[in-house]
Image (tube, rainbow, N blue to C red):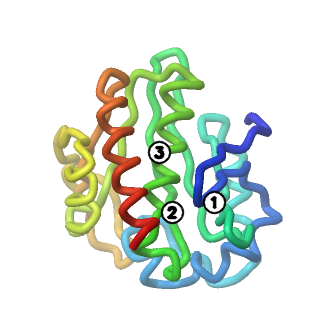
Amino acid sequence: MSNDSLLGRAVRLIPLSVSHAEALFTSASDPEVWRWTPRPRPDSLIQTRALIGEMLEDPARRCFAVQRLADEAVVGSTSLYALDLAEGRAEIGATGFDRSCWGGPYNAESKLLLFGHAFDDLGLVRIALRTDNLNVRSQQALARLGLVYEGTLRSHMIRQDGTRRDSLYYSVLADEWPALRDKLLTRIAAKSTA
């Protein structure tokens, strides 16, 4: 993984390390932050470190801590995963933010930085995001940004409560990236002034 960080106006994406576990544990252990995540929520700092360690061991994943520029606090994490440079594709996921950041520019700017890195730096041609069929808020946000709904993988994963989850897939292609970038910039500007 590159040692380069990705700099925005409100956040900086920095390479994730196990040393970020303490900063991320508060949000990682919040049931509402973790609600739509299929993997078990970490109950301790040790489990948070182990989760980060597992993610860092995956060669097809590029993990980032989200650092708020105003105070340099680590307020979340996100990653590119299932990264296949030969095929020119990846997915964005494992994204979570401290509840204090909800509604601000942080998630939108993190997506802007990740999409820019994927399309402009890595030369990818396709980025996908998936969400739980019950997570209507996420589906609406992805549709508002102009990502294309591709379909549903039925009974795709097991939720934390043991029920089966359908996963809805959305994507954006490299030639759609400029329009998405403009929408994200508009959204970030609106959230930054609100």
- The quarter of the rendered structure image containing the C terminus is bottom left
At label 2, which amino acid type do we have?
Tyr
Left or right: 160 with respect to 81? left
Q: Is residue 23 left or right of residue 94?
A: right
Residue bearing the label numbered 2: 106
**SS for dot 1:** strand
Q: From this view, report whether residue 5 is shown above or below residue 124.
A: below
Q: CA distance from mark 1 to mark 2?
A: 8 Å
Q: Nearer the viewer, residue 126 or 59?
A: 126
Q: Are marks 3 and 1 in contact (CB under 8 Å)?
A: no
Residue 62: % across, % down = 63, 42
Q: Is residue 118 above or below residue 151?
A: above
| The N terminus: image quadrant | top right
> What label does residue 112 carry, if any?
3
Q: Nearer the viewer, residue 194 or 81?
A: 194
Query: What residue sits 22% from the left and 47% below the top?
Result: 153
Query: Would you name the residue on which mark 1 appears?
Result: 66
Query: Around disc 1, counting alpha carbons within 10 Å, would you say few (fewer than 14), some (14 to 19), or many (20 or more)?
Result: many
Residue positioned most to the right: 19
Residue 102 figure quarter: bottom left
Compared to residue 43, the image places residue 4 above or below, namely above
Q: CA distance from mark 3 to mark 2?
A: 10 Å
The spot of residue 76 in percent (x, y) is 59, 66
Q: Is residue 29 left or right of residue 179?
A: right
> Which of pointers 1 and 2 lies earlier in the amino acid sequence?
1
